[in-house]
């Protein structure tokens, strides 16, 4: 089998290329992808050549960890059936071409255990499941405090805010510096940081990815307050010790989402406790992938760009 895939040959060197797929084994699904999302965090860093080393890192590679499609082949004993709608958080099925994270392709071969059955009515919105699970993971850690400030009103920040609102209680404040991203608050306020004089936040969740932000956030903490790092940071983080010392500040890193986070998000969607509406702002054919990536990374009005693979044979 072959597939058409997005291939990063190096920093700022992106193309669509036909790639051979590995032969499926007894535990694999073959999935035809309808939509995949472009991450403005990890994929931007791969595009810029600034991605820190991870296992599987290197060029050429197929990026992406947000793919939605339908099963076209499945093992006899699999819980998945032909034509089931599934979410695929990446694949490594391209032979010598690295898969980090390997979802931006028209067809994928993936272990059945990695594919997540979804409600087909979600359609293209299901590409947001990885970000929703990431937000859920950041808020659901054992002993985690309820956030009262979230930094960043991109897709991840909005999902964090929606999840926080769904839990009841006082809604969080959201900080945003980009005028194009101030709009569409759903049950919470969006402010510029300089408009906010509060300095006793108990829990601040940062979704900005700004490695220079810690001093500003520490200055806004209450005594014993916590900062949760929910973004992805390419550069070293540092902060002045005395203000953190005086506040007995706590730092927590929110790691990658887990299968149980995806399952929890799917349950919330099923019961109407979370919405993914209004977060996908741009759509392009996968045939126009180079232009789509440029728009996703350069247009501040682009919250989420998805590639449509349905017309790609």
Image (tube, grey):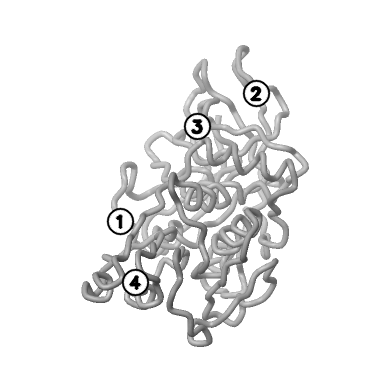
The residue where tag 3 is placed is: 21
Query: Which label lies toward us, 3 or 4?
Result: 4
Q: CA distance from mark 2 to mark 1?
A: 35 Å
Give SS at disc 4: helix
**Label for residue 214?**
4
Indicate the position of residue 79 as horizontal and vertical percent values: 63, 20
State which quadrant residue 252 falls in: bottom left
Q: Is residue 111 above or below residue 152?
A: above
Query: Which label lies toward us, 1 or 3?
Result: 1
Q: Is residue 23 above or below residue 284?
A: above
Could you tell which of marks 1 and 4 lies nearer the N-terminus?
A: 1
The residue where tag 1 is placed is: 52
Residue at the spot 69% in from the left edge and 67% down from the top edge? 187
Q: Is residue 166 above or below residue 25?
A: below
Name the foreground residue: 257 vs 193. Answer: 193
Q: CA distance from mark 3 to mark 4?
A: 44 Å
The residue where tag 2 is placed is: 80
């Amino acid at each position: 089998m072959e597939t058409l895939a997005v291939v990063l040959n190096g920093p700022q060197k992106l193309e669509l290329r036909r790639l051979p797929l590995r032969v499926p084994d007894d535990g694999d699904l073959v999935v035809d992808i309808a939509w995949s999302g472009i991450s403005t965090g990890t994929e931007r860093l791969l595009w810029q050549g600034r991605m820190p080393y991870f296992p599987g890192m290197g060029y050429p590679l197929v990026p992406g960890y947000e793919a939605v499609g339908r099963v076209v082949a499945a093992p006899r004993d699999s819980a998945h059936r032909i034509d089931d709608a599934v979410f695929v958080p990446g694949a490594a099925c391209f032979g010598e071409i690295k898969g980090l994270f390997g979802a931006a392709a028209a067809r994928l071969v993936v272990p059945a255990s990695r594919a997540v059955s979804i409600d087909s009515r979600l359609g293209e919105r299901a590409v947001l499941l990885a970000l929703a699970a990431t937000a859920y993971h950041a808020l659901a850690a054992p002993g985690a405090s309820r956030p009262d400030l979230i930094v960043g009103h991109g897709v991840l920040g909005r999902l964090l805010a929606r999840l926080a609102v769904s839990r009841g209680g006082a809604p969080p404040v959201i900080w945003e510096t980009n005028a194009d991203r101030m709009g569409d608050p759903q049950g919470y306020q969006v402010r510029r940081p300089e408009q906010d004089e509060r300095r006793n936040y108990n829990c601040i969740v940062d979704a900005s990815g700004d490695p220079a932000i810690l001093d500003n956030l520490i200055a806004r903490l209450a005594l014993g307050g916590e900062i949760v790092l929910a973004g992805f940071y390419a550069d070293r983080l540092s902060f002045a010790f005395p203000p953190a010392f005086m506040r007995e500040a706590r730092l927590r890193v929110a790691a990658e989402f887990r299968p149980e986070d995806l399952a929890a998000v799917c349950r919330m969607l099923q019961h109407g406790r979370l919405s993914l509406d209004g977060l996908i702002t741009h759509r392009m054919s996968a045939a126009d992938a180079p232009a789509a990536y440029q728009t996703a990374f350069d247009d501040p009005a682009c919250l989420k760009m998805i590639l449509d693979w349905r017309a790609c044979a």
